[in-house]
Amino acid sequence: MLFAALGDVDVNINFEDMTHSLEELRQDYTERFFTREGLDLLQSARLDSPATEEL
Amino acid sequence: METIAFRALIERLTGTPIKESSDDERQANDRLLEPIIRDDDRELDCSQFNELLLLVNKDRVEPAFYRRFFPERTLVRDLGLGVEHFQRIAMLRYGNFIHAYRRLSRLFSDDALEEELGDLPTESCDTAAPFLSRSPKVIDVEHIQREDTPLVGYLSFVLLDREEKAAKLLAAAAKDATASKDWDVYTDLVRRSVQPPLSMTALSAISAFRRRPSPTIAAFRSFLDDTLPAIAKRAAEGVQVQKIAAKNQDIYLTWDHMDVYFATSMRKAREFYDLYGFIHDLMARPELADLQLRYFDPTQCYTKLPVDKGLVECLVLKRAKCTVYSVQDSDTPGKDSELAATLAQGKPVIAFVPEIDVVDRTEKLLADHPAAILERLRFVLYADDSFMGETSTDDYKFVSDYRELHDSVLRIPFRSIPDAASDQFRATERSNLERLCRIIAAGEKRIYDKRATTLKQSHPLALQVNLDTGVANGVLVVRTVEECARLLRSVLTRTMDLIVREETGMWCLREKTSGCIFRVATKNRKIDNCFWNFYLRNASVRVDASLQAKENK
């Protein structure tokens, strides 16, 4: 599969991101990225973990 | 040989003018010189050469010096070859003729002279032997495929994680009974659900999808159901790639040999692909294939902490024998400091500026994602100073009026995986895209040609000094992989082909493959004298003390 990360993608990256591996970032379903409401929404849809590819 | 030519040679050899107290003395000296050097086929040995040196008030040389620089049976006509040979070595070792002559001409033995000169980047006769006799690697890196290389870069994997999280949140929100009926309600729910690091990714995806035909929330939910597994699968692959790349990093650190460091900027996926292709093509060249080179390939390794990554790169810069610097769209502090650090250690830097073939490049651009094509167009419009003048009126109008590419990119919700709508757009717009890509390729060619010219002719940082010795060290610019391979082999095997040239305000050594200045000796007396005082004089004291210490033992 081709990786299509493209030219002028504006990723809101910060130093905190750069100190974590992709594996660690993928585990991070916390209030750093989501509000409480968002986390509840993900939990109700069972999407609050990195294992979606196995579903 | 005329006396005037002989005088010029001696001044080149000693680095200073011949000083005579009067025109009468000069004429008297010429009358003595003329019958000796008139015959070009006359042989001169060291003793006879010294007599001529004293005749023009210059210091004599030891036999070791004469043997080192002049042919075995030196004819008068060959004196120039010896002087040129000396100048070449003087510029390589000292960047200064006066000091070189004073120091080298007084050394008594061949061994002392060779020890003083050290390893020079030229004149090696046993070229590949040290490489061929190397032991095989005990442990090798695990290869990461071209398509996976962007995953070792911080920007790419952060983007991937952001898009996975955003897609999951968007999918969860689309299942909400109330929000699933109205875009405004849905968007508000998403906005309330994410923190700032994720806001832009999530909201941009909604905005992009809503630009598509008939953008219902149900259709978006269906799109997300199809897309999310692909993003998650890619992210899972990314985790594995990073683990391999981290292991590779450790392996690079253990290698007992390190020949080449590749200095590059890697932010965009295209930069990973380009560097992967360049290194792969370069190392497969027949000029290098037998050398069993060890090189640090930044597309194959990953360090979690940026601080550690910086330390690793600095260590490899210290260990590698040379740096190959990729000239890309722009200069960046990271790779430019790597270039400077290499030059400051007195090691060669080869700068590779890809020569762009417009037809070939047009084909490659056409195969790219529409967003990548748009990014290239923006780059060319920004960086190509002569775009307006070099582009035909029709093409210029076409570029100005063609909105479809921009619009299609705005319809892409996620960028870390292929997008079916983009593939469809590329197929239906092939004719226009082909024209656009040809215009972009022509612009890229002008930009890269200009960058190569600047680096070769006028970039002030293309020449820096070895901070230990004060010897100027120039960047060697090549345009093709074949040239790069040939030059890299000559650098590593110390068989560089260097030509002595007298140019405006300086003597210089030009490297033959690149045509670039590798060493200079300025004719500016003030600068030359300052360098001599701050570098060579102290160095002389240190060397003398070291020799004295050896003798005392």
Image (cartoon, helix red, strand yellow):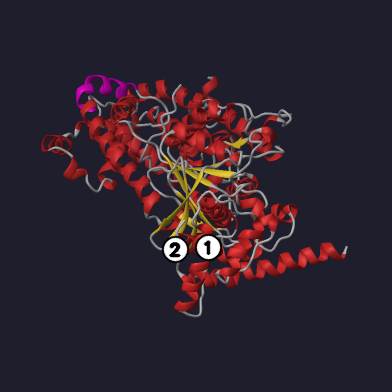
Question: From the viewer's perspective, is B232 left or right of B127?
Answer: left
- Select label 1 or label 2 by which is in front: 2
Residue B73 point in image, percent of width and height: 62, 47
Q: Could one spot residue B195 in this view of the protein?
A: no
Q: Position of residue B18 (x, y in %)?
A: 51, 70
**Chain where mark 1 sits:** B
Q: Nearer the viewer, residue B516 or B148?
A: B516
Of helix, strand and loop, which one carries label 2? helix
Q: Up-down: is B144 above or below B537?
A: above
Highlighted range, magenta: B420-433
Q: Earlier in the sequence, mark 1 or mark 2?
A: 2
Which residue has dot 1 on it? Answer: B10
In this picture, is B449 found above or below B363? below
Q: Is residue B421 magenta?
A: yes
Chain of the residue on which disc 2 is drawn: B
Residue farthest along the bottom direction in this orientation: B21
Amino acid under disc 2 = Ile
Q: Nearer the viewer, residue B538 or B58?
A: B58
Question: Is residue B347 visible from the viewing direction of this image?
Answer: yes
- Mark 2 lies on residue: B4
Image position of B214 (left or right of A44): left
| B353 over B80 or under it: above or below | above
Q: Is residue A4 magenta?
A: no
Question: Picture coordinates of residue B503 (x, y %)?
Answer: 40, 57
Q: CA distance from mark 1 to mark 2?
A: 10 Å
